Image (spheres, rainbow, N blue to C red):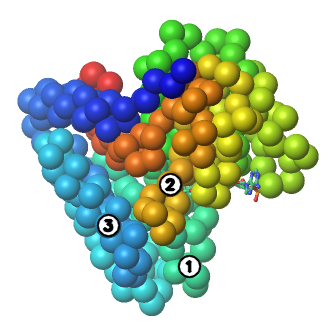
């Protein structure tokens, strides 16, 4: 039996259309468009592509996209001064500093300098704390997109065994918090875990965020499991995930492809967070 393929591209297109409607309604009430500022430091080609596609998607949703490009050798104080200016600008609802930053800049200090209520990436420690304690805040875009995809194929997540592979601040840890919020029983495995396959074999839900091409094999999965593959790895054959799709598709109940699974959801969730931020800041109710 072959798994249901979860079409993240189609889901993200639907979400973006709903956000565009929400933006129209917001503009009518607030008299301005939501504004997302994206800051890019240096010329990293991958970051350049991400920033360009975020700008395009923001404009397509009817929002203002404000791009700031700084040279790779910009002093940290100048970047922090720009963040302070954006924090104070009432027309800016979201601030995103594209990572990674050049080595001479302390990433955590820059993340901490963004006002938590404009931190649409959800990386600020205040937002991590809000997520952990059940307060409203901003949830990192990639794990938020993963939960939406899970809910699109599972009627309820409550009581399910979930295994998250990876414990990064931007994917693994917030993913585990979100699954806990959905009442899953959550296990997080990482590079020091003994016998990763044994944990995965128990899982009704597997979320893979490792960065190792095709690490998770079909025979590690519980038959019928729902598999969300966050990994984006460039190999000679093109882009592949952290899951060995060819063997997993015969065992899983549902699975995201790479590309076309989680990837498109990340930008859609960034737009969603920006609209939500604008709504909160202008006290306008927006449809999420
Ligand atoms: P990180 O490198 O920050 O984290 C990787 C995690 O995997 C770490 O916690 C590490 O453990 C763990 N790990 C490494 N080796 C193993 C192993 N053999 N067994 C189990 N766990 C292991 O990566 P990110 O979280 O930033 O990203 C993960 C993947 O997701 C990458 O492929 C990235 O490109 C992709 N990604 C995709 C996005 C999207 O939009 N679709 C967005 C963000 C990331 P330890 O902590 O012990 O080192």
Q: Determine crowd level at label 2: few under 14, some 14-19, many 20+ residues with C-alpha closer than 10 A.
A: many
The answer for how far apart the CA atoms under marks 3 and 2 are is: 18 Å
Q: Residue furthest bottom?
A: 73
The picture places residue 258, in percent across and down from the top left corner, at: 45, 47
Ligand 1 is found in the corner quadrant, namely bottom right
Nearer the N terminus, badge 3 or badge 2? 3
Nearest the viewer among 203 and 70 is 203
Q: Residue at x 32, y 38 (%)?
A: 9
SS of the residue at dot 3? helix
Q: Residue at x 56, y 79 (%)?
A: 105
Viewer-nearest of labels 1 and 3? 3
Q: Give above or below for 235 relative to 27.
A: below
Considering the image in quadrants, where does the C terminus appear?
A: top left
- Visible residue check, residue 264: yes
Q: Which mark is residue 49?
A: 3
SS of the residue at dot 2? strand
The picture places residue 38, in percent across and down from the top left corner, at: 32, 62
- Dot 2 corresponds to which residue? 240
Residue 207 picture quarter: top right
The answer for how far apart the CA atoms under marks 1 and 3 are is: 21 Å
In the rendered view, does 23 fall on the left or right side of 238? left
Q: Residue at x 54, y 21 (%)?
A: 1
Nearer the N terminus, badge 1 or badge 3? 3
Q: Give above or below for 56 relative to 188.
A: below
- Visible residue check, residue 186: no
Q: Determine crowd level at label 3: few under 14, some 14-19, many 20+ residues with C-alpha closer than 10 A.
A: few
Q: Give above or below for 255 relative to 126.
A: above
The picture places residue 22, in percent across and down from the top left corner, at: 20, 28
In the rendered view, does 166 fall on the left or right side of 39? right
The picture places residue 183, in percent across and down from the top left corner, at: 67, 16
Residue 19 picture quarter: top left
- Dot 1 corresponds to which residue? 105
């Amino acid at each position: 039996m072959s798994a249901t393929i979860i079409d993240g591209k189609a889901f993200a297109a639907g979400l973006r259309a709903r956000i565009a409607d929400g933006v129209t309604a917001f503009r009518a009430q607030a008299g301005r468009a939501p504004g997302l500022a994206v800051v890019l430091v240096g010329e990293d080609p991958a970051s350049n592509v991400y920033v360009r596609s975020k700008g395009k998607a923001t404009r397509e949703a009817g929002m203002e996209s404000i791009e700031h490009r700084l040279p790779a050798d910009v002093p940290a104080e100048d970047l922090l001064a720009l963040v302070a200016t954006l924090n104070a600008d009432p027309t800016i609802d979201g601030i995103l500093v594209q990572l990674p930053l050049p080595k001479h800049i302390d990433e955590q200090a820059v993340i901490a300098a963004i006002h938590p209520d404009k931190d649409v990436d959800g990386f600020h420690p205040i937002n991590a704390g809000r997520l952990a304690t059940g307060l409203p805040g901003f949830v990192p875009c990639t794990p938020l997109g993963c939960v939406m995809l899970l809910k699109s194929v599972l009627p309820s997540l409550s009581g399910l065994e979930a295994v998250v592979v990876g414990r990064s601040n931007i994917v693994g840890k917030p993913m585990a918090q979100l699954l806990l919020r959905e009442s899953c029983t959550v296990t997080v495995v990482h590079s020091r875990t003994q016998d990763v396959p044994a944990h995965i074999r128990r899982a009704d839900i597997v979320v893979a965020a490792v960065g190792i091409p095709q690490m998770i094999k079909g025979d590690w999965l519980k038959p019928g499991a729902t598999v969300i593959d966050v990994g984006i790895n460039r190999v000679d054959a093109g882009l592949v995930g952290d899951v060995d799709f060819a063997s997993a598709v015969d065992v899983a109940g549902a699975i995201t492809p790479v590309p076309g699974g989680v990837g498109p959801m990340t930008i859609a969730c960034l737009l969603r967070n920006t609209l939500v931020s604008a709504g909160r800041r202008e006290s306008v109710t927006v449809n999420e």
